[in-house]
Amino acid sequence: MPPKLLRDQPIVEKKLSVFPRVCDACKSAHQKLFKLLAACVQTAAIVALAQTVFSHSNAQTAFAAGDSDWVEDGVSEFAVPRGRPETLPPTRKQNEDRQVFQYQARPGQTTEPTDVPVGEISDDGVPVDTMGKTKKVRAPIQAGISTWQQGSGNGFDQRAARLLQQSPVLATPRIINADPKVFKSWLTATNPGVLDGATKESIIEIKGEWDDCAHALRTFGLPYTRVNPKKLSETNLNNTKIIVVNCEGHLPMESILQLRRFVAMGGYLLTTDWALENVVDKAFPGIIEWNEGYYTDGNNNNVVDAVIVADDAALTAGTPPVGHWLLVKKSQIVRILKPETVKVLARSRHMREDPDNLGILAVTFTYGNGRVMHLVGHFDNNSELAFNSAIPDAAPGLGFSLRQALAANFIAQALKQEIPEANSAKTEQ
């Protein structure tokens, strides 16, 4: 009724105005009446609005107090969506010091195998025990929750997950021409005195089919000696500190055994791409392996993003935290079998071909007194472009690739070590 009266007010006033016999006092009384009714209607509307606000406030209070039955489900700690608050729910807070992987055995494997000592390896590279039986190796890494500490810095913990999430994605790099002066000046500035006392015997390069590490070594100004794969077992390693094995790494078993002994005695070993299956898995079984998959983009090379994820000041010195990485066609995917020994240096967020969802680009581990580093891809500038001086994946501020910087730092660390003992001794058969 009141709203209707308000709507009828102009009509009434108009009718009153056409009757001169109505006194001014009556007109004034009607106007005051309509104003009073309008005030009452406004007051009722305000009261209704206040009741609505009060009811909504009570609902929010109940939700904040936990009275709602809505719960968050199916959210992974490994890839927290962007924009999620930093504060974690209590149930997740209890696990924030744990990394995001567990290790499950594949059919026919155990989760706690015995480590393989030096010398126990068959002619085909399979570890055997003293009774001639094949030993079982550790299971591959799988997604899940385990007890690895957040601050371990192994490159596949929660620290690494945050780095992968928070690091920017760079624009596609342009191809540049390599300048040897840039390579050498960076190496000597990052590793002072690295070339002092370095000789051709300090670095042995094993010729390969697809990679050409010798070209990269020359560009960095590092002296080396090239050895045929079949001649390694006959090579004098008295003054050798590091051996570099090119992809594809087809070595006879005598050379595989010599590499194994060389590292166990304190030597360094750098391998690239297909040498993962042909060298690393045979010489050091049960640590990392090829998971029988490839990083590939059709039949072409592929440049992917790369993020430094490991806490290793020596091997990551002078490198940007984010860069690019050239993967040659059919680069072998790395699977971790012994996580307590392995450290992942660089990973990619774009390697969806990896069933373990790690996107490993560079990995290192210790063996005996020595150390091994494996690169997914090659050490040389490129393998497909017409000009070998062209670099398709130059890292920001370097003038060359991040993969080359990590490998050069590894070689520099090897040159700083003492010459491994008993290098010249041939492998006992």
Image: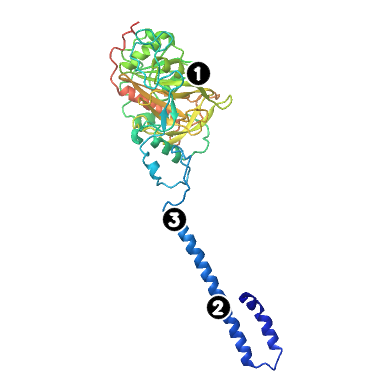
- Residue in front for this viewpoint, 162 or 191: 162
Q: Say if 146 sits above or below 421 in the image.
A: below
Q: Quadrant of residue 320?
A: top left
Q: Quadrant of residue 12?
A: bottom right
Q: Say if 346 sits above or below 51 in the image.
A: above
Marks 1 and 3 sit apart, C-alpha to C-alpha, by 66 Å
Quick check: 327 left or right of 336? right
Q: Which quadrant would the C terminus be assigned to in this image? A: top left
Q: Please, what is the three-letter code of the amino acid marked with disc 2? A: Ala
In the rendered image, residue 148, in percent from the top left (x then y), is placed at 36, 32
Mark 3 vs mark 2: in front: 3
Mark 1 touching mark 2, by CB under 8 A?
no
N-terminal-most mark, 1 or 2: 2
Marks 3 and 2 sit apart, C-alpha to C-alpha, by 35 Å
N-terminal-most mark, 1 or 3: 3
Marks 1 and 2 sit apart, C-alpha to C-alpha, by 90 Å
In the rendered image, residue 308, in percent from the top left (x then y), is placed at 41, 33
In the rendered image, residue 279, in percent from the top left (x then y), is placed at 43, 16
Report the number of numbered marks: 3
* Residue where numbered disc 2 is placed: 39
In the rendered image, residue 269, in percent from the top left (x then y), is placed at 38, 19
* Residue where numbered disc 3 is placed: 62
Quick check: 69 left or right of 422? right
Q: Which mark is residue 210?
A: 1
- Residue in front for this viewpoint, 203 or 39: 39
Q: Please, what is the three-letter code of the amino acid marked with disc 3? A: Ala
Q: Say if 171 sits above or below 380 in the image.
A: below
Q: Please, what is the three-letter code of the amino acid marked with disc 1? A: Trp
